[in-house]
């Protein structure tokens, strides 16, 4: 019997794709040959990293972990939400 895959919530899915969204959008625009102007292209390209907001206690643990994976911040499976947020803070100060 085939195992049923665990479904990812919309929030988890969004958290995992946000870091590359600006870049992916630009690739799509270039691929379809849109007549988007150069100023808009430049803004989209420059905001790829800027669209990420820093996680807070309001985020779920899964959202914080997705953010950390995208930002290449190491964490342990047993870390609490507070631990995760602290590691993010430390990584920003490096």
Image (cartoon, rainbow, N blue to C red):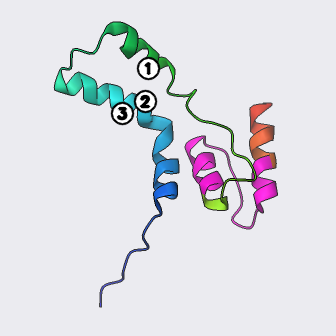
In the image, the segment drawn in magenta is 63-85
Tell me whether circle 2 and circle 3 mark residues in contact (CB < 8 Å).
yes
Question: Marks 1/3: CA distance?
Answer: 10 Å
Tell me whether circle 1 and circle 2 mark residues in contact (CB < 8 Å).
yes
Q: Secondary structure at mark 1?
A: helix
Whichever of labels 1 and 2 marks the residue nearer the N terminus, that label is 2
Residue 30, how many percent across, how many down?
Answer: 24, 22
User: Which residue appears at 37% of the width and 15% of the height?
Assistant: 41
User: Which residue appears at 71% of the width and 53% of the height?
Assistant: 58
Q: Secondary structure at mark 3?
A: helix
Residue 5, how many percent across, how many down?
Answer: 38, 75
Q: Is residue 64 left or right of residue 13?
A: right
Q: Residues within 10 Å of mark 2 (few under 14, many from 20)?
A: many
The residue wearing badge 1 is 45
The residue wearing badge 3 is 24
- Is residue 69 one of those drawn in magenta? yes
Residue 67, how many percent across, how many down?
Answer: 60, 47
Quarter residue 42 falls in: top left
Q: Is residue 22 above or below residue 2?
A: above
The residue wearing badge 2 is 22
User: Which residue appears at 50% of the width and 27% of the height?
Assistant: 48
Q: Quadrant of the C terminus?
A: top right
């Amino acid at each position: 019997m085939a195992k049923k895959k665990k479904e990812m919530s919309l929030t988890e899915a969004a958290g995992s794709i946000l870091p590359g969204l600006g870049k992916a959008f630009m690739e799509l625009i270039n691929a379809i040959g849109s007549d988007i102007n150069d100023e808009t292209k430049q803004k989209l390209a420059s905001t790829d990293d800027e669209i990420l907001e820093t996680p807070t206690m309001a985020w779920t643990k899964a959202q914080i972990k997705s953010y950390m994976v995208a930002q290449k911040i190491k964490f342990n499976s047993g870390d609490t939400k507070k631990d995760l947020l602290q590691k993010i803070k430390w990584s920003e100060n490096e």
